[in-house]
Structure formats: C-alpha cells, structure tokens
Amino acid sequence: MIVKVTYPHMGYMWICVKAMLEYLGVDVVLPPPSSKKTLSFGVKHAPEFACMPLKLNLGNFMEAAELGADTIVMAGGCGPCRFGYYAQVEHAILEDLGYKYQLVVLEPPEKHIGELLGKIRHITGNRSWRQVIRGVRFGYHKAQAVDELEKMAYYMRPREITAGETDLALNRALKEIIAVKAPEELPAAREKAAQIMRAVPLDRQRKVVRVGLVGEIYTLLDPFANQDIERKLGRMGVEVDRSIHLSEWINDHLFLGLAKNMRSSKLAKQKALAYLGHFVGGHGMETVGNTVLYAEQGFDGVIQLLPFTCMPEIVAQSILPKVSADLGIPTMTLIVDEQSGDAGVVTRLEAFVDLLMRKKEIREGSVKCTVI
Ligand code: SF4
C-alpha cells in the first residue's frame, strides 16, 4: 500500500523525520510551516482548554490533507499529562470533520522499542530491519547537524556586527543540511554549513548575558509557538542555551544514552530531586533540574516556556521561585497561547533582560548600587 505520510511541525524536527522517511522510500507530505492560519484552524475545532500544541497539530493535519496526505504519524505517550491521548483526540476530531486519515501512533521508545521500529517498518512497506535502522541513524545525524548550527547561532546572535546576519547564515547553512539525500554526503555538508556560519563577522569582546531556556518540549523547540524567543533574545544581547535539543532527546530515549558525549536529561532529573521527588509528566522534572544546572553553571537567568494549561509545567512553575531564591538565579515564566501577542512578549523579555544586565554590572563592579 502506498501512503502519503504527514506529521506535525515542531521546530526543525521535520528535517530529520523527512530525511529518515524519504531515505526509506516513504512519500512525505509536509504541512506548510505553522502560521496564524494553522493555529486558527486548530483553535476553531479543538477543545478550548486543550494546550496549544494540540491546536497546532490539528491545524498542521488539516493543511496537510489539502496537499494530499492520508496517513498521520504521531508520537504517543503515557501519563500523567494529556499527551498520551493527543493522537487519538486529534484523529477523532479530524474524523468528525470528514477527513479520512489513517493514524499511526509511535509509542515512547523506552518501553516499546520493538513496537516503534515495527511501526516504522510498517510505514515503509516492510523494508529490511537493516534499512530501517540505517534510516533512523540518518535522521538522527541530520538532527545532530541541525542542533550544531542552532548552538552556533546562540553564540553568534548577540555578538554579530550586522543585525540579522546570523539568521541569514543559519538559513543558508540549514539548506545545505536539508539538501543531503544520503548518509555519506552528510559530513561534507556539515562542514560547508559550519563554514557559512563561521564567516559571519562577530564582536567577541561584547558583553552579553547568558539565559537558559527550560520548559515544555514543543514550546521550547518551535519558534512559532514560542514567538521566536531565541532570535528576540539574541538581538537583545542574550546568549541563550536551550535545555532540550532533538538529537539529545533521540540519544536519551531511542539510543538509551549510547552517545556519552551528549547532554542527558538523566542529570537534570537527578538535580530536580531536591525539589521534586517524582515524575509529573512531560518535562516538568527536567525544567526544575535544568534550572538548578544553569544556576550551577553561572548563567545569569532562566526563562521557563509553557503553553497555557500545561500540567507538568504548572507544577514546575510553582517550584521555580524556591530554586531561584535558594540558588540566586532570576527566573521568569512565559505562558503562550493563541492570545499571545508579539509586543507583550517583547516588553516582558526586555524588562527581564534589563534586570539581568543590571545585576551583572553590579556583580562585576562596573555600576555601584545605591540604596536611598
Ligand atoms: S506536556 Fe503540557 S503541553 Fe505537552 S501535552 Fe502535556 S499538558 Fe499539553
């Protein structure tokens, strides 16, 4: 059976999933990039208090159907947050609206690795196990390449001489990675992409503040969902570090931490234990633990991102003031939904960044603090 597979957008995840599926001969129908139109479709048909990722996923699938997609591939999950039944809820809504989608749910790999690979094999028309594993590795290496470029951009944005040059370079560099069709071509493309990034002139002496981004994975990874926070902060003179990257997630969950030189969520979970003793769903524990880690690493502040009504992150949000007071690291929580506006987000970020810069200047002695 020939199927036309679609899947939701989540930042640059599409690059690695598309590479994996196309390498395995699957016909991929990519939804248009998430936009206000995508969100408006989701908002119209999803339950009002569903979190924003569900609404965006729904909009993605409706737009992909217009382009001929007939099969949804979606991650599954198991409690305690709502993610575990997202795929089924979205599918039921689409059926009610008359869409004829086949649904393939990929359950979390830790507990169902055989089932996961079996489903990937099913979508690919029963390719050999060897090919399936090669395809997964190809997707993973593309995710690594994309993450490397994003991390370079974090360093470069607050130090670029000409505003916007980093993002122009990043777009060109990503095109090099996207164009690769076979694993053996990837190393040369990675080198070329890195050269493009290195060619951007920087002022390496410029004083910047460093901010860690923690929170719910979708909102962290997806620039549309998070109002492009990484770029906004970069242009305000902030070097960001995002606590979750796709390749790290794949290494942790799919390869069970085989690559030892990568950041792992295990450490964050250990650090969280002083404040939160059990799993609360999603990335709630990582949010708390990564805030501790950022404080220990001398970061100037932490921003928590979450969609309105996100249960695990609401738990983490209630704990962060204690972490902040104990470890002396300023934290800010940014909640996003379909009502979020650009100007409101910018105003809040500017105020937080001003505070961090002022604090840093006082700490470094370049400004005296006078109490009146
Ligand atoms: S982690 Fe939060 S945003 Fe994600 S599905 Fe669960 S409740 Fe929704």
Image (cartoon, helix red, strand yellow):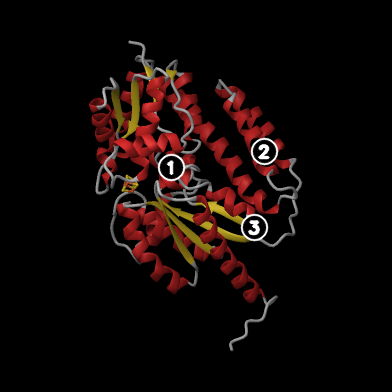
Q: Quadrant of residue 258?
A: top left
x and y, in percent, of residue 330 in the image: 50, 68
Residue 168's disc number: 2
Q: Quadrant of the C terminus?
A: bottom right
Looking at the rendered structure, the kind of residue marked 1 is Trp
Residue in front for this viewpoint, 208 or 67: 67
Report whether 363 appears left or right of 255: right
Q: Are marks 1 and 3 in contact (CB under 8 Å)?
A: no
x and y, in percent, of residue 20 in the image: 46, 25
Q: CA distance from mark 1 to mark 2?
A: 27 Å
Query: Badge 1, how many Cα within 10 Å: few under 14, some, many 20+?
Result: some
Looking at the rendered structure, the kind of residue marked 3 is Gly
Q: Is residue 314 visible?
A: yes
Report whether 218 appears left or right of 116: right
Residue in the picture at 50% in, 65% down: 295
Secondary structure under the numbered disc 1 in the rendered image: helix
Query: Which residue is tagged 3?
Result: 237
Q: Quadrant of the N terminus?
A: top left
Query: Which residue is tagged 1?
Result: 249
Above or below, 166 relative to 334: above
Secondary structure under the numbered disc 2 in the rendered image: helix
